[in-house]
Amino acid sequence: MQKPVYYTPEQLNKAIEQTPRFKFVSGTTPLEEVQNLSRFLDGPPIFVKRDDLTGPAFGGNKARHFEFAMGHVLEQGHDVVIAQYPPSSNAARVMAAACTKSGVRFILLIKPGEHLNPLQGNPLIYHLMNAEMVFLETSDSEEILTEIKSLEDRLKQSGHNPFTFQYTPWANHAGTLGYLHASIEIADQLNEKGINEAQFYVVAGHSHAGLQLGGKLMGKPWHVTGIPVSDYVDFTEAIPSWTKGVSELLHLPVSITPEEVQIDRTYEGIYPVPTEASIEAIHIAAKTDNLILDPVYTGKAMAGLIDHIKKGLISKEVPVVFIHTGGTPLIFQHANELQENLVRHSGIDTLSTD
């Protein structure tokens, strides 16, 4: 049996540098130990990778994703990016910021029934950044493709070179590449702390894929658990597919197999609706270590971590790394749900100071 080939962080970084990148992240984000949370849960040492601090437009993991998406866009000479996201999307917010920063026009497609009112949280931010919003007349996938083709044709007739993000391989390449690159940063930070083996908790998706691929390529004993926030994809199939695409793009020798993907769907609820567990997790993280999570993404991932610790499903001897993927503006978008939970659990009948 052939021995696996492992990459040093320097070798992996060199492979990634083959791909155009628009540098958008402010710099290295902290890896912070949250000792109060660990003590509160009577759990293992817990570290938080603070990718809520990546910088642009309240940051988040999507800033890492769109470094590579925009690198491709600019290399190919595109001057308009078209994307379809729900109004609550962190991706829409950060893509609007990336387009603004790079001087590329951004058009956001919104399905019927996906309302922007009240204009707060993520919708307010990408509205401030002058994202153009096109309200689609249908939710049918085939009809949406027809509307997009018509929009692309009109833009081309006006002399533009549009790029429709979701309908290219870069919809999957960018996020996986972003966290493959982040895995090098995380490995260096863990090495500085004398940590080799680690248990990772992250929102299931492209960041999970890139992180796990990086750990495998560097030969790290990293155990990655993904917590989905919606049922839009089977991650045990998608993550191997996404990592295979990036491995082929960069000529890397391995990808992730379905058997290696660890997913727990217990905490996902209905997207983008907060769950009772996610709101409770937000309160626990905030009151122990001033860690601000959101109720749609990171709150659900933290709910999974908290429950796994309480149930004894993870080792107390192996450090945990929780990937804080950002989403801070969603706190304000879901303020009513958070207030209702606070009232129920604190006995406070109003948040007014009158």
Image (cartoon, rainbow, N blue to C red):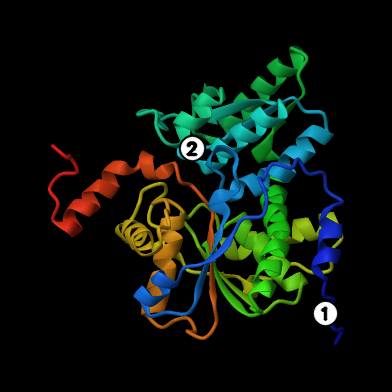
Is residue 256 something one can see in this rendering? Answer: no
Q: Residue at x 52, y 30 (%)?
A: 126
Q: Residue at x 65, y 61 (%)?
A: 209
Q: Nearer the viewer, residue 121 or 116?
A: 121
Q: Is residue 135 left or right of residue 280?
A: right
Q: Residue at x 69, y 74 (%)?
A: 191
**Looking at the rendering, which quadrant does residue 113 occupy?**
top left
Categorize mark 2 by other alpha carbons within 10 Å: few (<14), some (14-19), many (20+).
Answer: some
**SS category of the residue bearing label 2:** loop
Categorize mark 1 by other alpha carbons within 10 Å: few (<14), some (14-19), many (20+).
Answer: few
**SS category of the residue bearing label 1:** loop
The picture places residue 230, in percent across and down from the top left corner, at 46, 53
Q: Nearer the viewer, residue 153 or 219?
A: 219
Label for residue 86? 2
The picture places residue 261, in percent across and down from the top left corner, at 60, 70
Q: Is residue 127 left or right of residue 147?
A: left
The picture places residue 143, in percent across and down from the top left corner, at 57, 30
Residue at which label 1 appears: 4
Say above or below: 144 vs 336.
Answer: above
Q: Is residue 243 left or right of residue 59?
A: right
Label for residue 285? none
- The amino acid pointed to by label 2 is Pro
Q: Quadrant of the C terminus?
A: top left
Q: Residue at x 85, y 84 (%)?
A: 3
Which residue is situated farthest in the top direction here? 158
